[in-house]
Image: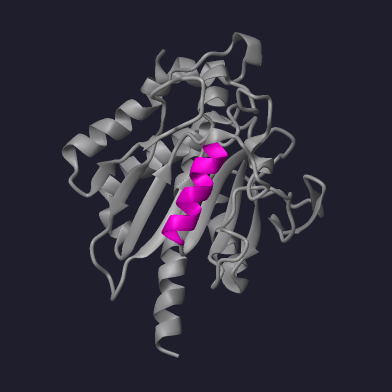
Amino acid sequence: MSRSSLMDASKAPASNCRRSLADILAPLDALAARLPAFIASPLPLNGCDDEGAVLPRYLFLGEPGGAASIHIGLFGGLHGDEPASAFGLVRFAEHLERKPEIARGYYLSIYPVCNLAGFVAGTRHAASGKDLNREFWRGSTEPEVRLLERELTDNRFDGLIALHTDDTSDGLYGFTSGALFTEELLRPALQAAETILPVNQHPVIDGFDARQGICRQGYSGVLSAPPLLRPRPFEIVFETPQHAPPDLQERAFVVALETMLREYRRFIAYAANL
């Protein structure tokens, strides 16, 4: 299935939508083959019906930019019916090849498809019928959740950014949690991405109070850092309007991610000089 037909399929009913995981990973694997700083590092997914299944993971090692690399986790495809979130990470990885200075001082762990069965079937939920993004830190038996929880625990990320698309929103918006300064990363990201798609300005978004596209409360059980981890990393969920053209959603994701990395590096540099 070609990339364009895959995007067309994302608008079809789930029962008629089948996607190829190999198609979306092909550009990332090609990037890993030609760029030493970009590494394919898949994770064995134990406990699922498909024996030998792996969760795709890619690592980007930015040029040194300080005493220690800033480790950020980027997550897409938690809901299988949101393919733009996965393709947005593919496009961002390709953007890093052209502009590696974006990731100077960073160590990025990229998880483009976190819900394998849902992505292939074109459904929001996993093979079990559960919404993976309501299962974290609740003793879940879902293989993807257990694996990602282990990644979140072992890596102690400095920041987490999850990409999603919302079929009920007419614009960009996001959720913030974790470190107190997190909103100061999301706000400029929304402003930068507004050159591509509008920001949702409604006072209530997805059932939560919002201001200028920022929600300070969200759902329980979403992908997040371990509850007892201190200090808390910044945690951002960035949402695009699902009915917008996929190409525009992907571009908005790239602009937002670049902006958040730039703003966080600026914040770290400022804090070091206090």
Q: In this view, does 6 lie to the left or right of 40?
A: right
Q: Is the magenta stretch mostly helix, strand or loop?
A: helix
Q: Which of 170 and 238 is in front in this view?
A: 238
Q: Which residue is drawn at 38% across and 24% down?
A: 52
**Measured from the top left, where is residue 116 in percent x and y?**
50, 27
Q: Can residue 195 be seen in this view?
A: no
**Can you give x and y, in whole percent of width and height, for residue 30 in the image?**
24, 31
Query: Which is more toward the observer, 89 or 169?
Result: 89
- The quarter holding residue 241 reads top right
Q: Is residue 151 magenta?
A: yes
**Left or right of 42 on screen, residue 255:** right
- The vertical placement of 168 against 48, above or below, is below
Q: What stretch is highlighted in magenta?
A: 144-156
Q: Residue at x 64, y 50 (%)?
A: 137
Q: Is residue 108 left or right of residue 221?
A: left
- The answer to whether any part of residue 263 appears in the image is yes
Which quadrant is home to the C terminus? Answer: bottom left
Give the residue drawn at x 68%, y 25%: 129
Image position of 87 with respect to 191: above or below: above
Quadrant where the N terminus lies?
top left
Residue closest to the far top: 16
Is 174 part of what is drawn in magenta?
no
**Residue 25 picture location, percent across and down:** 36, 29
Return the x and y of residue 155 as percentages of the image width and height. Answer: 42, 58
